[in-house]
Image: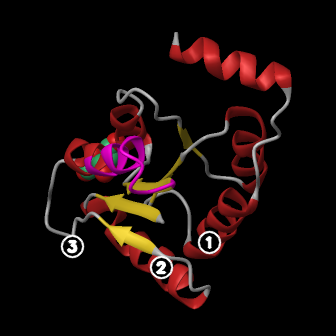
Amino acid sequence: MIALGCDHGGYELKKEVIKYLEEKQIPYKDFGCDSTDSVDYPVYAKKVANAIVSGECEKGILICGTGIGISIAANKIKGIRAALCHDVFSAEATRLHNNANVLAMGGRVVGPGLAIKIVETFLETEFSNDERHIRRITQIEE
Ligand code: RB5
């Protein structure tokens, strides 16, 4: 199950992500927001982060205007490794190396075509399980 969250700056791009997930029949849970009315991104970052930490959802996708605020907020929650990615290389690398469990993007930064390639790469790339990457991720948690 993929947890989705956004603020008003990410709402339109989140709709594109939902379209993609539905086409691919990938289960998701949308934690809001539900319009382009101004809201506070930490609220949605926390909802998605908590769904992952509790085990309700396996990964998350968070979108605000830049992706910056919402990723900073999500990374405050222990156990969350949120990666802000605006290119496919980073989306692949953060799964392989960081075992990132949240993808953050900026709805005012990337267009839907690139964003969907980033989502696809993030969701399809497995963690490498390399000893050195496990060691480094463990050090983040300490
Ligand atoms: C909202 O205007 C904007 O500040 C927010 O979407 C995000 O870009 C913050 O980092």
Q: From the viewer's side, name the closer residue of 44 and 108.
A: 44
> Cα distance, mark 3 to mark 2?
13 Å
Please rate how many residues cluster around mark 2, counting C-alpha atoms within 10 Å: few if below 14, some from 14 to 19, many from 20: some
Does label 1 or label 3 sit earlier along the sequence?
3
From this view, report whether residue 93 is shown above or below residue 29. Answer: above
| Residue ID for mark 3 | 34
| Residue ID for mark 1 | 116
User: Amino acid under label 1?
Assistant: Ile
From this view, report whether residue 42 is shown above or below residue 59. Answer: above
User: Amino acid under label 3?
Assistant: Asp
Q: Name the residue rendered at 36%, 69% in the picture.
A: 29
With 74 as the anchor, is 130 left or right in this view? right
Q: How many tags in the picture?
A: 3
Q: Name the residue rendered at 24%, 65% in the picture.
A: 32
Q: Secondary structure at mark 3?
A: loop
Residue 31 drawn at (x, y percent)? 27, 63
Identify the magenta region.
Answer: 47-58
Q: Are marks 3 and 2 in contact (CB under 8 Å)?
A: no
**Residue 70 covered by magenta stretch:** no
| Residue ID for mark 2 | 16
Residue 2 drawn at (x, y percent)? 48, 64
- The quadrant in which residue 135 appears is top right
Residue 43 drawn at (x, y percent)? 20, 46
Q: Name the residue rendered at 35%, 39% in the picture.
A: 69
Q: Are marks 1 and 2 in contact (CB under 8 Å)?
A: yes
Residue 111 drawn at (x, y percent)? 56, 69
